[in-house]
């Protein structure tokens, strides 16, 4: 496997891990509250990307690595079959991006209200 292909695949997995962290990082912060210092900026960035309609810097990096590897199609490839559709769904509209950003914001607000109320009810900073 050529090096650009390996790097492109690693970037895709990093991208997917970031998306998963944005979605569930608040829940992880319930267990490890200091994780919020990393999760809140990550979630804010993801919401900004969705609402502003800008590209995450990982996307052009990934595309340039795929181009360098001479890759066009991902038919039959695990990454292309299961990971790419999660990150780049067909028919993604501006409205869908706004809804996804709002959903991430709402979910995380609920989680962080729970974290703050739990801290407030114990009277102890964790």
Image (cartoon, rainbow, N blue to C red):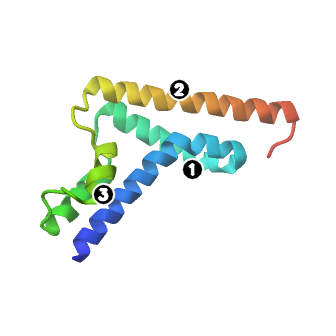
Q: Looking at the image, tell me whether mark 1 or mark 3 is earlier in sequence order.
A: 1
Residue 79's label in the rendered image is 3
Query: Comparing marks 2 and 1, which lies closer to the viewer?
Result: 2
Residue 55 occupies quadrant: top left
Q: Do the residues labelled 3 and 2 touch (CB within 8 Å)?
A: no
The numbered mark, 3 or 2, whose residue comes first in the sequence reads 3
Where residue 106 is drawn, which disc sits there? 2
Q: Which residue is depicted at the point 63% across and 50% down?
A: 35
**How far across and down, in percent of the image, does residue 1 sit?**
23, 76
Q: Crowding near pointer 2: few (<14 within 10 Å), some, many (20+)? A: few
Taking the spot 41% from the left edge, 30% from the top edge, the residue there is 101
Q: Read off the residue under disc 1.
A: 38
Foreground residue among 46 and 11: 11
Q: How far apart are marks 2 and 1 (CA)?
A: 18 Å
Residue 7 coordinates in the image, percent (x, y): 30, 69
On the question of residue 7 being in view, the answer is yes
User: Residue at image x 35%, y 65%?
Assistant: 10
């Amino acid at each position: 496997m050529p090096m650009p292909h390996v790097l492109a695949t690693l970037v895709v997995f990093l991208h997917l891990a970031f998306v998963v962290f944005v979605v569930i990082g608040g829940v992880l912060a319930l267990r490890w509250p200091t994780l919020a210092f990393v999760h809140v900026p990550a979630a804010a960035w993801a919401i900004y990307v969705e609402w502003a309609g800008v590209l995450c810097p990982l996307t052009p990096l990934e595309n340039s690595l795929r181009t360098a590897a001479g890759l066009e199609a991902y038919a039959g490839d695990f990454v292309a079959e299961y990971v790419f559709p999660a990150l780049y769904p067909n028919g993604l509209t501006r409205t869908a991006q706004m809804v996804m950003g709002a959903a991430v914001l709402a979910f995380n607000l609920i989680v962080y209200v729970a974290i703050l109320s739990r801290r407030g009810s114990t009277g102890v900073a964790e």
